[in-house]
Image: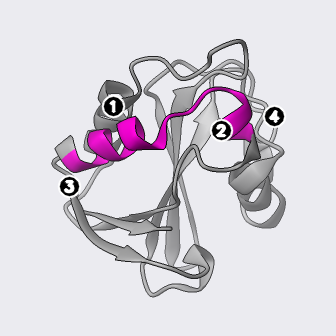
Amino acid sequence: MIIAKKSGNILQGKEKRIAFAVNTEGANDCGFAGLVSSEYWPELAHIGKTELCTVLSKKVGEVEFFALCCHSLIGKGWVNQAAVIKKCFDSIPGEEPVASIAIGTGLIGVLSGADFDQIKEGMEASQKEIVLYL
């Protein structure tokens, strides 16, 4: 469930658990995933094929990153968006709130068919408390 909405840079926020999207092809060197892979998690950039709804995590200092495999780069890559997003967020371990970027609203999401309304629906349906950065 979305418990708060914020603006600004998620990496400069007070939240210490950050979620973002990655793709099933494992090519995560662009967009927000690319930023995370270049600055904090280099092995994420080219992890290879990853199953839909997989959640990967890495702790860097005080921040724990959660890479949610929720789309493909091929064709209409965002299928069952609300259900996939809900499953990904519900799979994040722990009870603490998780900050999330506005998944699907960047260039890669737009080009691959993301529907942010469906993505937000999945966030709202999740049991995880989510702080959404817009």
Location of mark 3 (residue): 1
The CA span between labels 2 and 3 is 21 Å
Check disc 3 and give the amino acid type. Met
Check disc 4 and give the amino acid type. His
Whether 93 is drawn above or below 100: the answer is: above
Q: Examine the image and state in which quarter residue 23 appears.
A: top right
Whether 8 is drawn above or below 95: the answer is: below
Q: Residue 38, position in %: x, y?
A: 84, 59
Location of mark 4 (residue): 46
Tell me what residue is drawn at x 22 percent, y 49 percent.
Answer: 124
Q: Examine the image and state in which quarter residue 109 appears.
A: top right
Q: Earlier in the sequence, mark 1 or mark 2?
A: 1
Residue 121 is covered by the magenta coloring? yes
Mark 4–mark 2 CB contact (< 8 Å) = no
Q: Which residues are magenta?
A: 108-124
Tell me what residue is drawn at x 33 percent, y 31 percent.
Answer: 82
